[in-house]
Image (spheres, rainbow, N blue to C red):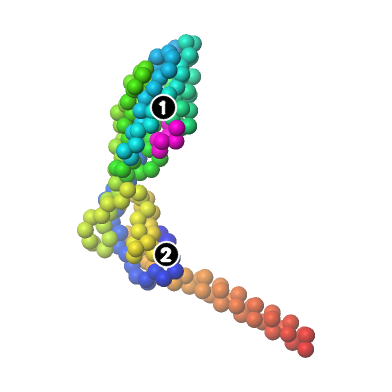
Amino acid sequence: ATASAGATSKTYEVKVDALATSQTNSGTLLSKTDASVVSQGTNEFNITIGGKTTKVSAVISENDTNDQALTKLKDAINNAKTGVTATIVTDDTGKKKLELRSDKTGTDQAFEVEDVTGNAISATGVKNATQLASNASYSVNGGETLTSQSNTIELEKGKVTATLKAPTTEAVSIQVKPDNDKVISQVKDLVSSYNTMYSRLKEAG
């Protein structure tokens, strides 16, 4: 947690019921050296997130392997910058799969993917979510349950912010108070600067 200048000295009791999560669509594991399961030619598909739909396309060649096809799809998705990032995950046996994840947490960042031309989405198995987007759920000082799209929450109208790291069984105390070590350090610097100035003025007569 951090507090800005002007924050009130007080203690907050924060209980975290759930963290905010990103949506993840994890695809089917494929042998990287086998012929591409994605159809040859231009594959077009839509990515819809936050009410905005973007059409993405990738061209799969006749001799492309699954590894090459997955790489083309990953690059096409990432270059589109829709708010969904694609990665290729490799398991212990060397098989690979495409994985899509929303860049931000929260239900507002839930997304859908669907084929338009070709079978890129259905063939790679990334159509359905394997982890749903969700909001953080928490309470402050025993009050009502609050929700947040992200895991960074505001207290005292933004003068204090806290980042939620994990659900808790009991409330966690956040104490806002002056930074005594910093105050002492600044006073010492002031005294040192004053003494230096005094010595130089004395030497100069």
Q: Which mark is residue 3?
A: 2
Quarter where residue 21 is shown:
top left
Q: Of the residues tagged 1 and 2, which is closer to the observer? A: 1
Toward the viewer: 25 or 18? 25
Q: In which quarter of the image is the N terminus?
A: bottom left
The stretch drawn in magenta includes residue 195: no
Quarter where residue 48 is shown:
top left
Q: Quadrant of the C terminus?
A: bottom right
Dot 2, crowdedness within 10 Å: few (<14), some or many (≥20)? Answer: some
Horizontal side, residue 99 vs residue 13: left or right? right
Q: Do the residues labelled 1 and 2 touch (CB within 8 Å)?
A: no
Using the numbered discs, state the Cα–Cα distance from disc 1 to disc 2 in whole angstroms.
43 Å
In the displayed structure, 77 sits above or below 118; it is below
Judge whether residue 34 can be spotted in this image.
no
Secondary structure at numbered mark 2: strand
The amino acid pointed to by label 1 is Val
Toward the viewer: 53 or 102? 53
Judge whether residue 189 can be spotted in this image.
yes
Dot 1, crowdedness within 10 Å: few (<14), some or many (≥20)? Answer: some
Horizontal side, residue 10 vs residue 194: left or right? left
**Residue 156 drawn at (x, y percent):** 34, 65
Sequence-wise first label, 1 or 2: 2
Q: Give the range drawn in magenta.
A: 80-86
For mark 1, what is the residue? Answer: 56
Horizontal side, residue 83 vs residue 183: left or right? left
**Residue 18 drawn at (x, y percent):** 29, 48
Quarter where residue 42 is shown:
top left
**Residue 12 drawn at (x, y percent):** 32, 64
Secondary structure at numbered mark 1: strand
Q: Residue 76 carries which label?
A: none
Q: Residue furthest right?
A: 204
